[in-house]
């Protein structure tokens, strides 16, 4: 019988962390022998007699493995790359927000009108993604800040906790979850200024009785700041801040109880 040759079904295998997988190794002519595999992802193993690779991968990453088959006719090897993707995150009430790292432009994949909506006192869970050339990147984020900003010279009215965020997903599905609180105290000034500037006929906003005036919608200019750790330790400062372009969020307040 000829020297064995491993059947190259594929040279790159993609699986998802936490999901059970099966991959059958074989020779081109069906020879029997002993199978081994060096560099398998954590959670996977190979059956020495059948060549079946199975298990539940536990750690996302890229694994350059080598499958080996041996019998009396010789030894064959096949390099195989296992890509274990992060399990991602389950659908929730979070609003996806994407920031283009080149232009700073902000987009909302799940918002049909391209705006965020919230009522005074609401909490908005955001899933912020950082994109370059249309692809989400897994970057060393050390801080996220969401706030309102009416003029360039003004400081942000901070509505999030910069250090309160968590990473969800990985690789090209990486996002950072943060919670924005439309704080009635923080929003009192911007909303009052807006209502005063849009009062009809000099009537104070709180005195309006027309049904169409019972609610004020402020098209609030917003900005997201992302703090990133420098990978090159020769550069200073150790962390840098990237700001998004200004974008809109509609903030609603009931003028009457």
Image: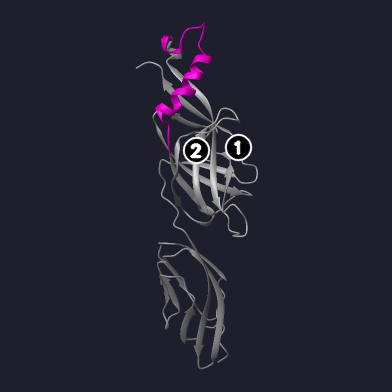
205 over 148 or under it: above or below: above
Say whether residue 195 is magenta. yes
* Percent position of residue 193, x then y: 50, 19
Image quadrant in which you'd find residue 58? bottom left
The residue carrying mark 1 is 245
* Percent position of residue 12, x then y: 56, 68
Q: Quadrant of the N terminus?
A: bottom right
Q: Secondary structure at mark 1?
A: loop
The number of callouts visible is 2
Q: Is residue 103 left or right of residue 120?
A: right
Q: Residue at x 47, y 7 (%)?
A: 203
Q: How many C-alpha atoms fall within 10 Å of the one at disc 1: few (<14), some, or many (≥20)?
A: some
Q: Outermost residue, left direction?
A: 257
> Gap between marks 2 and 1, in whole Å?
12 Å
Q: Which residues are magenta?
A: 180-209
Between 43 and 34, the one lying in front of the other is: 43
212 over 20 or under it: above or below: above
Q: Secondary structure at mark 2?
A: strand
Q: Quadrant of the C terminus?
A: top left
* Percent position of residue 98, x then y: 55, 43
The residue carrying mark 2 is 146
Say whether residue 101 is magenta. no
- Sooner in the amino-acid sequence: mark 2 or mark 1: 2
Q: Is residue 126 visible?
A: yes
Between 202 and 238, the one lying in front of the other is: 238
Between 127 and 240, the one lying in front of the other is: 240
172 over 155 or under it: above or below: below
């Amino acid at each position: 019988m000829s020297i064995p040759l491993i059947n190259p079904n594929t040279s790159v295998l993609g699986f998802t962390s936490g999901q059970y997988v099966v991959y059958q190794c074989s020779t081109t002519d069906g020879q029997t022998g002993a199978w081994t595999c060096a560099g398998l992802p954590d959670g996977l193993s190979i059956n020495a007699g059948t060549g079946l690779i199975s298990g539940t991968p536990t750690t996302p990453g890229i694994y350059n493995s080598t499958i080996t088959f041996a019998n009396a006719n010789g030894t064959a090897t096949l390099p195989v790359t296992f890509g274990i993707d992060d399990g991602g995150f389950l659908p929730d009430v979070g609003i996806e927000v994407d920031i283009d790292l080149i232009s700073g432009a902000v987009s909302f994949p799940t918002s049909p009108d391209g705006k965020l909506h919230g009522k005074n006192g609401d909490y908005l869970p955001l899933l912020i993604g950082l994109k370059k050339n249309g692809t989400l990147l897994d970057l060393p984020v050390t801080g996220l800040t969401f706030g309102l900003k009416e003029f360039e010279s003004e400081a942000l009215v901070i509505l999030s906790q910069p250090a309160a965020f968590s990473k969800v997903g990985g690789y090209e599905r990486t996002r950072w979850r943060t919670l924005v609180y439309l704080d009635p105290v923080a929003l009192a000034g911007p909303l009052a200024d807006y209502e005063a500037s849009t009062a009809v006929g000099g009537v104070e906003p709180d005195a309006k009785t027309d049904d169409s005036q019972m609610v004020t919608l402020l098209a609030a200019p917003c900005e997201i700041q992302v703090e990133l750790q420098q990978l090159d330790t020769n550069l200073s400062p150790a962390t840098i801040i990237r700001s998004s372009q200004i974008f809109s969020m509609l903030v609603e307040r009931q003028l009457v109880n």
